[in-house]
Image (cartoon, helix red, strand yellow):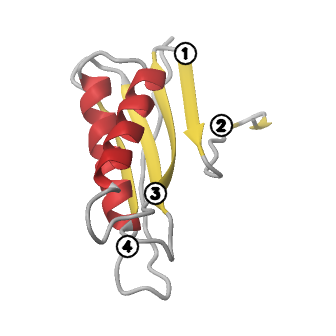
């Protein structure tokens, strides 16, 4: 029986007047489900740009049939390329994603963002 994840997102603003994080949680056109969070590096240049660009790239690459490793590499390349622009030097983001296909979960992460599976038998 295929796993039917329940999806929800919420962002609670803190001290900054803007959000540096990006989130994606939805079923894709091929019935797989992608859930991802990109946490822009606060205090660095353009963390909001980095997280948004990384998420946009991740979703597009996965929708195009790439696996998470390939999609993360593409996202990293786009963020790195953009970081040479004026005002964006040093921008970055962490990112964590899970791709659900039937009963199989594939997880990828870069940085200190983590993924946990909460189930009736505990947290993994």
Q: For residue 96, say whether it is visible.
A: yes
Q: Residues within 10 Å of mark 2 (few under 14, many from 20)?
A: few
Residue bearing mark 1: 104
* Disc 1 from disc 3: Cα separation: 30 Å
Q: Residues within 10 Å of mark 4 (few under 14, many from 20)?
A: some
Residue bearing mark 4: 19
Residues under numbered marks 1 and 4 in contact, where contact means CB atoms less than 8 Å apart: no
Q: Position of residue 56 (x, y in %)?
A: 27, 44
Secondary structure of the residue carrying tag 4 is: loop
Q: Earlier in the sequence, mark 3 or mark 4?
A: 4
Q: Tell which tag, 3 or 2, sits nearer the viewer.
A: 3
Q: Earlier in the sequence, mark 1 or mark 3?
A: 3
Residues under numbered marks 2 and 4 in contact, where contact means CB atoms less than 8 Å apart: no
Residue bearing mark 2: 117
Residue 78 versus residue 43 in the image, above or below: above
* Disc 2 from disc 4: Cα separation: 25 Å
Q: Position of residue 14 (x, y in %)?
A: 49, 83
């Amino acid at each position: 029986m295929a796993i039917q994840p329940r999806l929800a997102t919420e962002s609670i603003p803190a001290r900054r007047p803007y959000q540096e994080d990006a989130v994606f949680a939805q079923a894709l056109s091929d019935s797989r489900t992608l859930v991802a969070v990109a946490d822009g590096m606060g205090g660095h240049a353009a963390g909001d740009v980095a997280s948004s660009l990384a998420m946009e790239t991740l979703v597009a690459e996965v929708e195009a049939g790439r696996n998470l490793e390939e999609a993360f590499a593409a996202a990293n390349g786009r963020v790195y390329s953009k970081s040479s622009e004026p005002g964006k030097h040093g921008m970055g983001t962490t990112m964590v994603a899970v791709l659900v296909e039937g009963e199989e979960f594939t997880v990828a992460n870069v940085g200190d963002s983590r993924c946990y599976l909460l189930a009736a038998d505990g947290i993994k």
